[in-house]
Amino acid sequence: MAEELEISIFFQSGDSDFCPPEKIVLMATSFPNVTIMMQHGGSDMAHILAAHPLLCDETRNLVIGTYPLRGSGPDGADRFLKTLPKALEKSVVFTSEMPFGYPELELKIIELTNLNQEIKELILRKNIKRILKI
């Protein structure tokens, strides 16, 4: 139905058995014409996708949210964001978990990373605008 309506599906992921990141990747590969957005578990998926380049090709419809970066600080954020394969740079979007998270802190962490400005712009603005067609 999401494909027919041309809408994205958003999953709150994590370490639980209810919605682990691996299942979201399976969903993305099963429905390649639907944009699947994942919150949490992004750093785990970055490592998995980096280790399996063919999986990157099969998950071009997977969008990974940045939250939570605050536990890892700028160095951890650098590791997470730089681990993503080049093919997925356009698949990462800024997320903050508002109203429970701290958007200002999450933004500051991205600002403090060593990523080039072009990639920061993709993560903070351009990717989500393209994905949501706005």
Image (cartoon, rainbow, N blue to C red):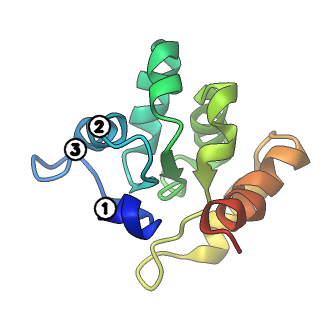
Q: Report x, y in % for residue 82.
A: 67, 30
Residue nearest the viewer, comparing 33 with 57: 33
Residue nearest the viewer, comparing 32 with 126: 32
Query: Which disc is residue 30 wearing?
Result: 2
Mark 2 lies on a secondary structure that is helix
What residue do we see at 44% from left, 47% from top?
33
First in residue order: circle 1 vs circle 2: 1
Query: Which disc is residue 20 wearing?
Result: 3
**Left-right relation of 88 to 126:** left
* Crowd around label 2: few <14 · some 14–19 · many ≥20 (10 Å): few
Mark 3 lies on a secondary structure that is loop
First in residue order: circle 3 vs circle 2: 3
Query: Does 63 appear above or below 67?
Result: above
Query: Does 87 appear above or below 38?
Result: above
Query: Does 131 appear above or below 86?
Result: below
Residue nearest the viewer, comparing 102 with 49: 49
Mark 1 lies on a secondary structure that is strand
3 or 2: mark nearer the eye: 2
Residue behind mark 1: 12
What residue do we see at 82% from left, 56% from top?
121
Q: CA distance from mark 3 to mark 1?
A: 9 Å
Query: Which image quadrant is residue 78 in?
Result: top right
